[in-house]
Amino acid sequence: MIRAVADTNVLVSAAIKPRGEAGRVLAHWQNGEFTLLYGTALLEELIDVLNRPHLRDKYRLTPHYLHLFLGVIRIRGEKVEPTHRVTVCRDPHDDMFLDVALNGEADYVISNDNDLLVLSPFEDIQIITPSAFLRQLEHQNR
């Protein structure tokens, strides 16, 4: 089974546009096509971003919807608490995604962030965009 980490922006995009590329990535996950890995720091950042008033208001993110969205990640995702940390990203904040990927033995990090994308492959982990990940899943399912 494919193991992947989605960065915060991908998860936020999935929450606000479930029919967009990021939302389709999560739909494949919910269909059991890959394992979604997450860590405490990633989840805390996701909670913080999704609870920002301007996002909640603009996209009508109700507390109930956010509770369900985050609950699905907590329950169906695989929590990874990194024991080894990396410091390789141009933006040190992005290292947390690689920490989870490396410690969780991920195959992919899904991101649109150029600071992460330029590192691909990292320790045999492919760092790819949501659209490239969707193509990979479609190719695998043929």
Image (spheres, helix red, strand yellow):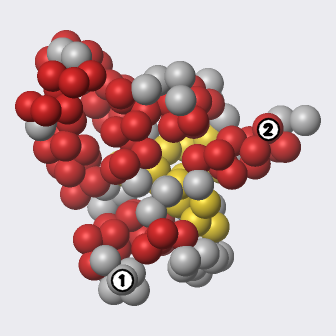
Q: Quadrant of residue 75?
A: top left
The residue depicted at 31 percent of the width and 77 percent of the height is 91
Give the answer, above or below, for where 108 lies relative to 43: below
Examine the rendering and report whether any part of residue 40 can be seen. Answer: no
User: Which of the two residues, 8 or 104, is positioned nearer the viewer here?
Assistant: 8
The residue depicted at 51 percent of the width and 37 percent of the height is 22
> Residue 90: which disc?
1
The local crowd at label 1, few if under 14, some if 14 to 19, many if 20 or more residues have their Cα within 10 Å, is few
User: Which of the two residues, 114 or 80, is positioned nearer the viewer here?
Assistant: 114
Which residue, as the protein is rendered here, is positioned at the far left? Answer: 53
User: Which is nearer the N-term, disc 2 or disc 1?
Assistant: 1
The residue depicted at 18 percent of the width and 48 percent of the height is 44
Q: Which amino acid type is marked by label 2?
A: Glu
How far across and how far down the image is residue 95, in percent?
34, 74
Tally of numbered tags: 2
User: Which of the two residues, 76 or 4, is positioned nearer the viewer here?
Assistant: 4
How far across and how far down the image is residue 96, in percent?
32, 68
Give the answer, above or below, for where 105 lies relative to 92: above
How far across and how far down the image is residue 71, in percent?
29, 26
> Residue 11: which disc?
none
Which residue, as the protein is rendered here, is positioned at the far right? Answer: 142
The residue depicted at 66 percent of the width and 35 percent of the height is 33
Q: Secondary structure at mark 1?
A: loop
> Residue 138: which disc?
2
Q: CA distance from mark 2 to mark 1?
A: 31 Å
